[in-house]
Image: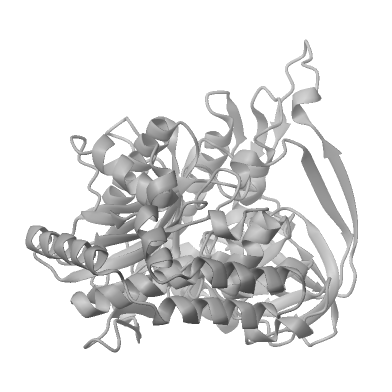
Amino acid sequence: MKDIGQVGGKNASLGEMVTAFRGRNIPVPAGFAITATAYWAFIDGNALREPIATLLQRYHKGELALSAAGAAVRNLILKASLPIDLREDILKAYRALVRRAGSRSVAVRSSATAEDLPNASFAGQHESFLNIRGERALLASCRRCMASLFNDRAIVYRARNRFDDMKVALSVGVQTMVRSDKGGAGVMFTLDPESGFPGVVRIEGAWGLGEMVVKGTITPDSYMIFKALLDQPRLTPIVEKSRGGAKSKMVYGQGHRTATKVVPTSRREQMSFVLSDREILKLAKWAVAIEAHYGKPMDIEWGKDGVSNRLYILQARPETFQSHAPSTLTSYRITRAGRLMASGLAVGAGIAIGPVFRMTNAKDAAIFPKGGILVARHTDPDWVPVMRRARAIITEQGGRTSHAAIVSREFGIPAVIGAPLTRDLKNGQVVTVSTCEGDEGKVYAGAARFAAKSINPSHVKRTRTKIMVNLANPAAAMRWWRLPTAGIGLARMEFIIANHIKIHPLALARFSELADQKARRTIAALTENEDKKEYFVDRLARGMARLAALSYPLPVIVRTSDFKTNEYAALLG
């Protein structure tokens, strides 16, 4: 990590892990870095430093539009040629890598010297290219990575974080590809990215290359693992497990013109988890080891090679939001709301009210109204200028580690991610976006009424009487981890069933006798490819385990079910 100034955060971290974990069976694909010195040699060898600085100064003075300045700088770099000695060094290293790995296919990744820092992630600001094969394609991709240092979004991000354009260099990482196109890939955090709870690992993944998980163009599988029991081989401390059912995946393309392509997933893939329990636990153990080595919460990318069935760590960076978030705990409570119009994953805990503005193209950023509620299919780094002006974000696709989720946390705005039914949301319609009601984010018609209260848990004095907390909804439990309590004094099992399972137990135990056809269809969809009785048992067990994980090693008192008939009647089926 001491080499960040020479190879950037991404490459420095890869080199750190290769060195640190070589003898600990945490595999990182082989590769090499083209340094910041090489970048400046390329820039100065083509006499580009002064024209780039002039173009950017004109933009910052308001004399040139961002799009025009960025395009002009990128064009200068793309038309320039690599110095002959640098070109030969790159090709020599590539040939050695091909001989070592037995494959011509590499990932070409950008690694800026101001990237993956604790106070600025630069998440997705620069370009990376997958499945690059052959020397000509490699050299072209290296130039494209260097040019991406001046993407419009990267220029804006540097200005916002007060980085000097001409003091940031770009290192290029060339890394052997893992055949995750035939397996799967994803990301993991060494804390809960929503609440900041440090006692768990959150893993998300999907079939194929991991690009679609990172960009949020699909809804991935999601797993939560309790760290404290990972070293006990007889236990399986998975406290949450949900299947994304993504209908598409990214795989290798054919020929040089299409390095990657998006294809439909099979029915079997849609109905299956991308990781087995054994693989989930292995990745979680690796995440804990990586976190311990770096001494801070980490954001990690992983890949599963579908040919060898081996797991790999593809990169790791410091987590930049929750680990630096203020310790103030704000609780929100909806007191009156309109009709529920859409729902998805809740990102951030808050409430936002504003007019809907639907967008299909980030290039229309100029027409987005400040304070609007952005509704989009998904977002990628090109959307950042729009997202900065939004009061809340709603996407139809994506998971908790998607681009939209990461950026909304960084900007401190609530987001509802992976809300499939947004067609009823019309432009100009005032809605309330609520992410304060558990894992499920909700969009209500009109302006809801709500109350908010803030406290700093570290300022709360300890009492002689041990204070315990009552919790009933596993989905919302994690956000209370900072409260100075002596454990959970009451967790009513029927509330866990009502909040977490939501299906009448007899409708699962005697599904064939259920006459309500609408309920049958809904239950069939929720439990697809699962034994219905086991679905109930697993959801109940994981819901209770999630409460226990929050409180560990303090006690949790669970009162077993005493459902009243009216409470049972409200359940599905």
Q: Quadrant of residue 371?
A: bottom right
The quadrant of the image that shows the C terminus is bottom right
The quadrant of the image that shows the N terminus is top left
Give how far across and how far down residue 561 sits, in percent: 61, 44
Of residues 466 and 159, the one drawn nearer to the viewer in this rendering = 159
Query: In the figure, is residue 337 to the left or right of 6?
Result: right
Give how far across and how far down residue 369 sits, in percent: 82, 78
Does residue 74 sit above or below 178 in this rendering? below
Of residues 106 and 395, the one drawn nearer to the viewer in this rendering = 106
The answer to whether residue 284 is seen in the rendering is yes
Of residues 64 and 84, the one drawn nearer to the viewer in this rendering = 84
Tally of numbered discs = 0
Of residues 10 and 332, the one drawn nearer to the viewer in this rendering = 10
Q: Quadrant of residue 568?
A: bottom right
Q: Residue at x 46, y 62 (%)?
A: 509
> Which coloring applies here?
one colour
Give how far across and how far down residue 439 sits, in percent: 63, 56
The answer to whether residue 244 is seen in the rendering is no
Give how far across and how far down residue 546 sits, in percent: 53, 42
Q: Residue at x 41, y 69 (%)?
A: 145
Query: In the figure, is residue 488 to the left or right of 76?
Result: right
Q: Residue at x 80, y 87 (%)?
A: 427
Does residue 194 sit above or below 214 in this rendering? above
Q: Residue at x 88, y 75 (%)?
A: 446
